[in-house]
Image (tube, rainbow, N blue to C red):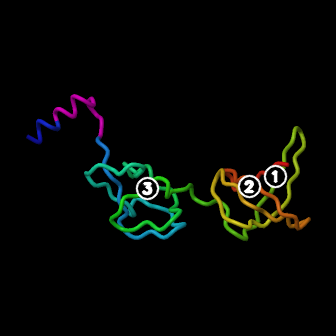
Amino acid sequence: MRVLVALCLTVALGPGTALAGSVLATRTLRANTLIGAEDVTLVDRPAAPGAAQSPEEVVGFEARVTLYAGRPIPLSALAPPALVQRNQIVPLVFRRGGLEIRAEGRALGRGGEGDSIRIMNLASRSTVTGWVTDTGEVHVTP
């Protein structure tokens, strides 16, 4: 019976198509923990809606909230790893046309690539909002 079901699924999905399972945490992962391959396991049961279906979807990401051992990992509970930590000194970059202004600032929050964070300009002591780039710089717009 199993061979027949597998054969029917292979014919329906096409050769080389892998069935998705459900990704579970192997241990309790606190918020802001970087998820590694050893932190997850793939089980052969349907994934809940919005939950990860393959380890590649979660490995290398950071947990936004605590993820408990043996439970499915919701994709909404994951974020890119933080590149900027709170109180870290980061380069501020302002670009407009051919003008580029650079300054140093202190991060008032933490964030990953594409996140909006508040930064205090160390020279002027003013607070600005900018977006974290893949290099860890924070780009500010007027």
User: Which residue is label 3 attached to?
Assistant: 74
Q: Position of residue 108 (x, y in %)?
A: 74, 67
Magenta-colored span: 7-18
* Quadrant in the rendering for residue 36: bottom left
Q: Position of residue 73 (x, y in %)?
A: 41, 58
From the viewer's side, name the closer residue of 128 and 134. Answer: 128
Residue at x 64%, y 52% (from the top left corner): 113
Find residue 139 and name its label: none
At label 3, the amino acid type is Pro
Label whose residue precedes the other's in the sequence (3 or 1)? 3
Q: Say which of marks 3 and 1 sits in front.
A: 3
Q: Residues within 10 Å of mark 3 (few under 14, many from 20)?
A: some
**In screen coordinates, is 19 left or right of 129?**
left
**In screen coordinates, is 35 left or right of 69?**
right
Q: Say which of marks 2 and 3 sits in front.
A: 3
Q: Residues within 10 Å of mark 2 (few under 14, many from 20)?
A: some
Residue 77 is a magenta residue: no
Q: How many marks?
A: 3
User: Which residue is label 1 attached to?
Assistant: 93
Q: Position of residue 16 (x, y in %)?
A: 28, 34
* Element type at mark 1: strand
Find residue 137 and name its label: 2
Contact (CB < 8 A) between labels 1 and 2? yes
Q: Position of residue 115 (x, y in %)?
A: 66, 54
At label 1, the amino acid type is Val
Label whose residue precedes the other's in the sequence (1 or 2)? 1
Query: Residues under labels 3 and 1: Cα distance?
Result: 34 Å
Residue 14 is a magenta residue: yes
At label 2, the amino acid type is Glu
